[in-house]
């Protein structure tokens, strides 16, 4: 049985905030002219949970397009970030993490991962400096090596800001030794910190150098082809993930029920009304999301509203309610309704 509870988060009115940024459409169906020698193509990052994949994607794109969290399986959709340069267009594809599926949702996410790996030109393997390379990393590389079409590989020693120079050196030596150990070839090995922006530009240069010659694939003023409604739904889910138990994140999904400009507002003071639902699988989970006297849900709304305001460039009125879809991760009907 579905249930719901409403919490309305009052907008922070700011007369200086600008008008709505139009939502982007799907992948481009046509190509634009590009100068001779122009490169274009697709790259993705892989790695164990919390290896810094989404954080690095956001740092390279220069805008938050992928949510981040310490919780495993945070990324659930294929998100494309577009990097435009005079000499190239790099499309970064942020994917869900490969994992042992326990639900129909897990199976579908893994299928997305394998499909993406097989279609990109370059894979950046994120191997965080503050973690030892282990069986999980080797499993990922083994799966990549068995793809029908193997992309080029770049090793990325992420999170260099968390360790000493000595530790970075040891980590880079271990990464280099994996070539012979696992029978693979690194096109480059780059230490990088997305948080301090250290060598992020080097990562981009290496990825671009491995792209094929090609035309412009997306308009050069786009940073993602993700619809704005989906981006706002993800911002709400990111806020909802904070502070919950390890089991609950997998049960949380978000739907934008309606999004419309507020009628009667002056042209120079627009506002967006957003109505969203947080979906969980059990009534007990619903109670956790709402919190004592609705305080937790109100905080989720506050955090998400501020980020949605920054994304849209205008004040946002965000109304969230929580509904229960029993075992939605295992139900094909629910998964289809939720866009999976």
Image: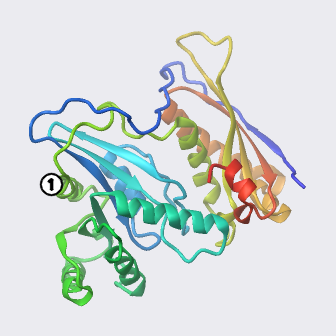
Q: In x, y percent, where is residue 279?
A: 74, 53
Is residue 70 at all visible to an observer of this figure?
no
Residue on which disc 1 sits: 209
Q: Nearer the viewer, residue 101 or 318?
A: 101
The answer to which image quadrant residue 134 occupies is bottom left
Q: What residue do we see at 51% from left, 24% from top? A: 20
Tell me: residue 319, above or below residue 22: below
Q: Nearer the viewer, residue 314 or 155?
A: 155
Report whether 335 appears left or right of 167: right
Is residue 22 at all visible to an observer of this figure?
yes
The answer to which image quadrant residue 321 occupies is top right
Q: In x, y percent, where is residue 216?
A: 25, 36
Report whether 128 appears left or right of 74: left
Tell me: residue 260, above or below residue 189: above
Question: Hey, which residue is sitting farthest front in the picture?
Answer: 148
Colour treatment of the image: rainbow
Report whether 257 appears left or right of 294: left
Q: In x, y percent, where is residue 61?
A: 33, 46
Q: Residues within 10 Å of mark 1 (few under 14, many from 20)?
A: few
The kind of secondary structure element at disc 1 is: helix
- Where the N terminus falls, by quadrant? bottom right
């Amino acid at each position: 049985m579905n249930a719901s509870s409403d919490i309305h988060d009052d907008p922070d009115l700011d007369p200086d905030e600008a008008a709505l940024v139009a939502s982007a459409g799907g992948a481009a169906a046509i190509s634009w002219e590009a100068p001779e020698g122009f490169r274009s193509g697709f790259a993705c990052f892989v790695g164990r949970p919390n290896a810094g994949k989404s954080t690095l994607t956001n740092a390279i794109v220069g805008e938050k397009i992928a949510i981040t969290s310490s919780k495993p399986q945070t990324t659930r959709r294929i998100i494309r970030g577009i990097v435009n340069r005079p000499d190239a267009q790099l499309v970064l594809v942020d994917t869900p993490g490969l994992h042992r599926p326990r639900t129909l949702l897990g199976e579908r996410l893994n299928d997305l991962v394998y499909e993406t790996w097989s279609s990109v030109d370059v894979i950046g393997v994120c191997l965080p400096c503050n973690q030892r390379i282990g069986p999980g990393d080797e499993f990922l590389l083994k799966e990549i090596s068995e793809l029908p079409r193997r992309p080029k590989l770049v090793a990325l020693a992420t999170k260099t800001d968390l360790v000493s120079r000595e530790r970075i050196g040891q980590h880079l030596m271990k990464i280099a030794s994996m070539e012979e150990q696992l029978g693979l070839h690194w096109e480059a090995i780059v230490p990088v910190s997305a948080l301090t922006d250290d060598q992020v530009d080097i990562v981009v240069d290496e990825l671009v150098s491995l792209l094929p010659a090609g035309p412009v694939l997306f308009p050069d003023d786009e940073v993602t082809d993700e619809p704005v409604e989906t981006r706002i739904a993800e911002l709400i889910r990111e806020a909802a993930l904070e502070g919950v138990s390890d089991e609950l994140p997998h049960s949380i999904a978000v739907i934008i029920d309606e999004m419309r400009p507020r009628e009667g507002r002056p042209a120079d003071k627009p506002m967006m009304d957003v109505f969203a639902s947080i979906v969980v699988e059990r009534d007990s989970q619903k109670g956790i999301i709402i919190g004592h006297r609705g305080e937790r849900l109100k905080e989720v709304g506050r955090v998400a509203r501020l980020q949605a305001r920054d994304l849209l460039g205008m004040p946002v009125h965000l109304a969230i309610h929580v509904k229960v879809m029993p075992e939605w991760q295992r139900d094909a009907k629910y998964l289809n309704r939720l866009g999976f």
